Amino acid sequence: MSQQKPKQASGFDSPSGGRWRLHQKHRSRVAAFFGELVGTAMFVLIACWGCVQTPIFNNTHFQSGLTFGLAILIAIQCYGSVSGAHLNPAITLAAALYGVLHWGMAIAYFVAQVAGAFIGYGLLVAVLPHNAIKGVDNPAGVCVTVLASDISVLQGVFIEFLITCCLVMVACSVWDPRNAKLKDSVPVRFGLTVSCLIITAGLFTGASMNPTRSLGPAVWNDSWEHHWIYWVGPLVAGAVTSLIYRFAFKGDEVIELRSSNAKIRVVEEVVLP
């Protein structure tokens, strides 16, 4: 009798039907990548569409800010369970430093977000007339983040840093183990947070808080004035805020006992009552 060769470990399963498919672990990673890509594209498309302002298509700053928040809400509702729906390199950097995302996946998320922003804004360019993308009311291009005339470069960086700190603080609170049971309203929380911050600071810097959200419109409109601000401010805010929350505010994981209503805290393999 011939001996059967042991199956070699690979990234694929071979079901009885003979079809090859990814292991669940790898499948989840691929799904997370495309969740970030499609989610970012969806967010940029809807949010920037809500910023169109022409003599024919009326719009207001309040309406644009509200649309951005609702666009975030939709994207998180759709892809929050797939990838966490970061949709933002500043949030992804914060997640990696906070310890809830592996650095390898963080790089994959970043690539997906850049591609998603490019695709999302490209779809907007494809479906709208040129004068709705770039015209008298939007000389730099619709949704392109620019500084107000009275705002200096230093003030612009600081404003983007501060408002992104607020956004990242919300994300860190969601990741906090003590909030493990309070995730049913995460899309609403982020949507309202983004709307509030854009309504507050949008007239000064555009209130990007998201490098790739600024990158997509900048690429398609070839508009790069002070573009670096929308990378430095949000990314530094993401790093600083996540580290402060992790070491100053993050709580211990709470485990519920099935046999009673009592709870215990786990601290470095030591169980405390």
Image (cartoon, rainbow, N blue to C red):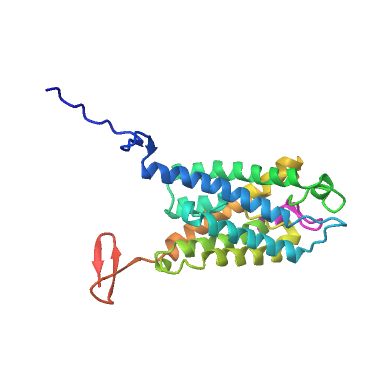
- Outermost residue, left direction? 1
Vertical side of 220 occupied by 72: above or below: below
Frontmost residue, 39 versus 223: 39
Frontmost residue, 163 versus 216: 216
Q: Quadrant of the C terminus?
A: bottom left
Give the left or right position of residue 184, taking residue 153 as reference: left
Residue 40 is a magenta residue = no
**Residue 128 appears anywhere in the view:** yes
Task: Look at 76% across and 40% down and name the residue there.
Answer: 222
Residue 256 position, x and y percent, is 30, 70
Task: Look at 71% across and 40% down and name the residue there.
Answer: 219
Residue 83 position, x and y percent, is 48, 51
Frontmost residue, 268 versus 27: 27
Q: Which residues are magenta?
A: 145-158
Give the left or right position of residue 85, taking residue 250 as reference: right
Residue 86 position, x and y percent, is 53, 53
**Residue 228 appears anywhere in the view:** no
Vertical side of 110 occupied by 271: above or below: below
